[in-house]
Amino acid sequence: MPELPEVETVRAGLERLLAGSVIRRARARRADLRTGIPDLRRLDGRRVAGVRRRAKYLLIDTDGPTILNHLGMTGRWHEPAGGSPGLHDHVILELADGRSLAFNDARRFGVFEFCRADGGHDALDRLGPEPLSAAFAGGVLRAAAARHRRAPIKAVIMDQAVVVGVGNIYAAESLFRAGISPALAAGRVRGERLDRLAAEIRAVLAEAIAKGGSTIDDYRQVNGLSGLFQNSFAVYGRDGQPCSACGTAIRVRAIGGRSSFWCPRCQR
């Protein structure tokens, strides 16, 4: 499933293609994805003001309703070849300048809805701070670790009410750089180590965005290119391979139902 760097990369691509454009016609080619698709005629004739991201959600602002879009597991935006939609192109935005953009989702776990009149949405109401914002720092993790002392630190940083957008891949990479075992109880991770972890979360996410995200399976940028950050993984997906720092074999175990990769020597 695309994580924050992938969604931010898609956001930037959509911003370039959509901002300032008028939607001549919006249409859905099926009734639902993960949830129902609303009446898209509300978008006809609307001008796109810009594209934002909140956590792993895309927010497409128009001079009418705001679209809330989640990519799910396989969702992607693209310009259909020859203007003709493909098999899994479920939502089509036909623009006044003759171009079209399609939301493609083979497994149909994505979301395409409208925000409320106040600009909010139930999916956004209880989210924590953005990890790349000034609102996120070591103090956020210190407070969360105090509240969830017995929980594995990996589960804490993946809790979207604590900090948004830190999924399985980037949690693994951030914990490796911070030298913290993913299974360590949050209450045992002391202040300076939490400060470092917050800094590494920001650094890992920023580097991944700069490289267009990570392509493991289906993810592609709006221009069809793969991300490149997967070539920089230190631990994720490398079980049994030697740690690049010390040579110890990378291990994997399930934490919170997700595969967790770490170096038993470098991470304590």
Image: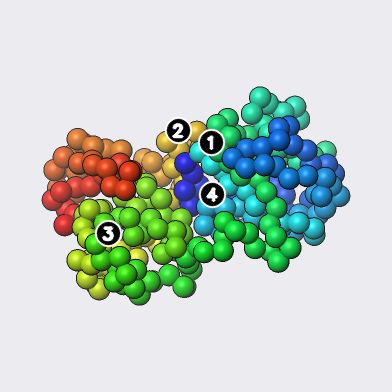
Query: How far apart in space, not on screen, are marks 2 and 1 (Cα)?
Result: 9 Å
Q: Which residue is mark 4?
A: 7
Q: Secondary structure at mark 1?
A: loop
C-alpha distance separating marks 4 and 1: 12 Å
Residue with the mark numbered 2 = 217
Residue 22 in the image: above or below residue 52: above
Numbered badge on residue 214:
none
133 left or right of 244 in image: right
Marks 2 and 4, how far apart at CA: 15 Å
Q: Where does residue 87 sit, x and y in percent of width and height?
A: 66, 24
Q: Residue at x 50, y 33 (%)?
A: 218
Mark 4 and mark 3: span between their CA atoms? 27 Å
Mark 2 or 1: in front is: 1
Q: Residue furthest top?
A: 87
> Which residue is painted at 25% across and 73% down in the image?
191
Pointer 1 residue: 74
Q: Nearer the viewer, mark 3 or mark 1?
A: 3
Are the residues at dot 2 and dot 3 in contact (C-beta closer than 8 Å)?
Answer: no
Q: Is residue 247 left or right of residue 22?
A: left
Q: How is the image coloured?
A: rainbow
Residue appearing at x 68%, y 26% in the figure = 86
Q: Residues within 10 Å of mark 3 (few under 14, many from 20)?
A: some
Q: Contact, CB < 8 Å: mark 3 with mark 1?
A: no
User: Residue 151: which numbered mark, if any?
Assistant: 3
Pinpoint residue 202: horizontal percent, then vertical percent: 40, 62
- Judged from the image, the secondary structure of the residue bearing numbered disc 3 is loop
Whether the residues at callouts 2 and 1 have beta carbons within 8 Å, the answer is yes
